[in-house]
Image (spheres, rainbow, N blue to C red):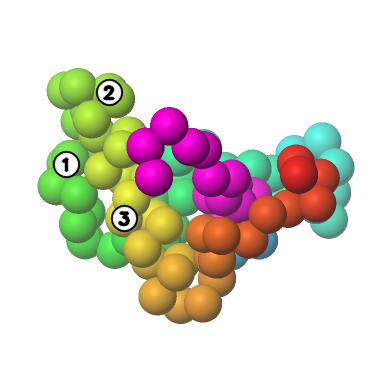
Amino acid sequence: MFGTFRRVSDLMIAATKVCEIPYLYHPGEYKWPKLEEAYEVLCCGDPAGIGGVQDHRALSDTAVAGYCMLSMYAEGQYAPRLILEAYA
């Protein structure tokens, strides 16, 4: 519906648990991955076709985030409509 906003779960929070990139300053914890880091872990073969170059940052970020989301959703690691209690 036009003019409404629907909360969804944060993609990078979900990617934190999947990517498991060690947090340098807190051993045993994982950091929120940068979008590029999550893309490398989740999307083999560069499906967004950026080739490591982001000519138009907003457009390539959108494509990369979309592929990360689809990859985690397909594996049951991301539920878009889940509202996290911390952000509700």
Secondary structure of residue under mark 1: loop
Residue 12 coordinates in the image, percent (x, y): 57, 46
How far apart are the alpha carbons under marks 3 and 1?
A: 14 Å
27 or 1, which is in the foreground? 1
Determine which of the numbered discs, if any, sits on residue 10 in the image.
none
Q: Is residue 7 magenta?
A: yes
Q: Which residue is drawn at the image coordinates 14% and 47% (left, top)? A: 49
Mark 1 or 2: in front is 2
The residue under the point 51% across, 77% down is 76
Label 3 sits on what residue type?
Answer: Tyr
Mark toward the start of the polypeptide (1 vs 2): 1
In percent of the image, x 64 and y 43: which residue is there?
32
What separation in Å lies between label 1 and label 2 (alpha carbons)? 13 Å
Tell me if 30 is positioned left or right of 68 in this view: right
**Residue 45 visible:** yes
- The amino acid type found where label 1 is placed reads Gly
Dot in front, 3 or 1: 3
The CA span between labels 3 and 2 is: 15 Å
Q: Which residue is mark 2?
A: 57
Q: Secondary structure at mark 2?
A: helix
8 vs 55, nearest the viewer: 8
Instruction: Determine contact: label 3, label 2, CB under 8 Å.
Output: no
Above or below, 41 against 54 in this view is below
Q: Which residue is mark 3?
A: 67
* Dominant SS type (magenta): loop
Q: Which residues are magenta?
A: 1-15
The quarter of the picture where residue 65 lies is: top left
Examine the rendering and report whether any part of residue 20 can be seen: no
Residue 51: image tag: 1
